[in-house]
Image (cartoon, grey):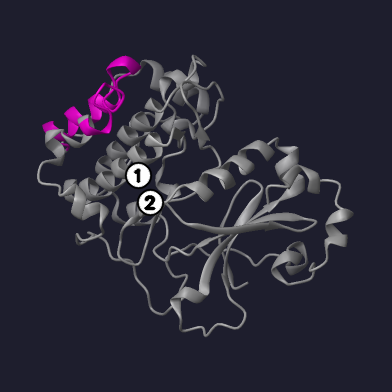
């Protein structure tokens, strides 16, 4: 256990290293997602984290973070994942203010490929935002945090996601499909080009009202082709939204804004990324925010203190997390 990489509502992500591995070896480092059982149960998120584990165990794509194994102790559930050293796209975007069209195109294109792969497996991601996008050492995207992802063949009705990125049909509880990910991609593309999302308010309900009714207004520097793609992704009529038409993701890829993108080379990692993260040493955390260290006693599973099944037998919540 080395350092905290991020914190959430009911857990944190830690940088960890294999005990007997040499610290100079990149493969010795992992990200460990630690989820406090009592908080997961209190917030009624058991189904979500079990779904996250199941989906990440089955998805294999270069632009989705890899899950290696999971386990539990009497206090937490643990998910051992690859360490993506470049930090969140959110941090890089805030540092830059906004991205150029070329930088935006590279990252949006990687997400088109990732979303298409998920949708082909009947998986809706439902939480696309800069905070959930990491950059690897080469500057390529890795989608992380599948807590809201769900395998659905048709529609689902769960209200979940981040206010600024919610599609209208989620807000209106009409039932939603994979089309919500294309809406969120349009929001993300706008935010990368403008430096802020198109619909926001100081109160979530104000944001919802704008998503449902406010006109889509662009800063003057955003060009006509970019505007056209964003408008088609942010179509409030789901039946007319780009990505949700008969051609699916191919309709998005064939939009003129992506003219010149070599999709095969991109998916193979053969293109030069526009942002190469800083890395002063192997296992560096310089691209992540700093957090106070956790209490080591709150994570016995990371200290080898629970090698025995007897501890789990005393845990009244263990039966809820047998998937781990």
Would you call the spot at circle 1 few (<14 residues within 10 Å), some (14-19), or many (20 or more)?
many
Circle 1 sits on which residue? 114
Q: Residue at x 28, y 49 (%)?
A: 107
Q: Residue at x 68, y 47 (%)?
A: 323
Q: Residue at x 46, y 84 (%)?
A: 24
Q: Which residues are magenta?
A: 222-250
Quarter of image, res 18: bottom right
Q: x, y (%) of residue 138?
A: 30, 65
Q: Give the SS element for disc 2.
A: loop
Q: x, y (%) of residue 304?
A: 74, 72
In the picture, the disc for residue 61 is 2
Dot 2 or dot 1, earlier in sequence = 2
Q: In this orientation, which residue lies closer to the viewer: 141 or 103?
A: 141
Mark 2–mark 1 distance (CA, rounded to whole Å): 7 Å
Horizontally, residue 255 falls left or right of residue 166, namely: left
Nearest to viewer (mark 2 / mark 1): 2
Query: Is 233 colored magenta in this rendering?
Result: yes
**Are the two marked residues, 2 and 1, in contact with CB atoms closer than 8 angstroms?**
yes
Quarter of image, res 70: bottom right
In the picture, the disc for residue 310 is none
Residue 45 visible in rendering: no
Q: x, y (%) of residue 177?
A: 43, 24
Would you call the spot at circle 2 few (<14 residues within 10 Å), some (14-19), or many (20 or more)?
some
Q: Where 200 sits versus 268, above or below?
A: above
Horizontally, residue 199 falls left or right of residue 13, namely: left
């Amino acid at each position: 256990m080395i350092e905290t990489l991020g914190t959430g509502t009911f857990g944190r992500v830690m940088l960890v290293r294999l005990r007997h591995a040499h610290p100079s070896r990149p493969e010795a480092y992992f990200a460990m997602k630690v989820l406090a059982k009592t908080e997961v149960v209190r917030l009624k998120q058991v189904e979500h984290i079990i779904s996250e584990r199941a989906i990440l165990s089955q998805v294999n794509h270069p632009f989705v973070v890899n899950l290696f194994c999971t386990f539990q102790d009497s206090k937490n559930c643990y998910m051992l994942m690859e360490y993506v050293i470049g930090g969140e796209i959110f941090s890089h975007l805030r540092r830059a203010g906004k991205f150029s069209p070329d930088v935006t195109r590279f990252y949006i294109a990687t997400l088109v490929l990732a979303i298409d792969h998920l949708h082909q497996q009947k998986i809706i991601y439902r939480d696309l935002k800069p905070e959930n996008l990491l950059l690897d050492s080469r500057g390529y995207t890795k989608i992380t945090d599948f807590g809201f992802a769900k395998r659905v063949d048709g529609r689902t009705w769960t209200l979940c996601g981040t206010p600024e990125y919610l599609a209208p049909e989620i807000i209106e509880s009409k039932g939603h499909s994979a089309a919500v990910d294309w809406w969120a991609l349009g929001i993300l593309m706008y935010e990368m080009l403008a430096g802020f999302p198109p619909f926001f308010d100081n109160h979530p309900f104000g944001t919802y009202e704008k998503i449902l009714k406010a006109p889509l207004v662009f800063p003057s520097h955003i060009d006509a082709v970019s505007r056209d793609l964003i408008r088609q992704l942010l179509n409030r009529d789901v039946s007319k939204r780009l990505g949700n038409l008969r051609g699916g993701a191919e309709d998005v890829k064939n939009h003129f804004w992506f003219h010149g993108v070599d999709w095969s080379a991109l998916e193979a990692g053969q293109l030069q990324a526009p942002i190469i993260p800083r890395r002063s040493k192997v296992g560096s955390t310089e691209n992540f925010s700093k957090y106070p260290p956790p209490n080591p006693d709150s994570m016995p599973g990371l200290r080898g203190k629970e090698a025995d099944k007897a501890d789990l037998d005393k845990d009244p919540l263990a039966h809820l997390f047998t998937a781990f």
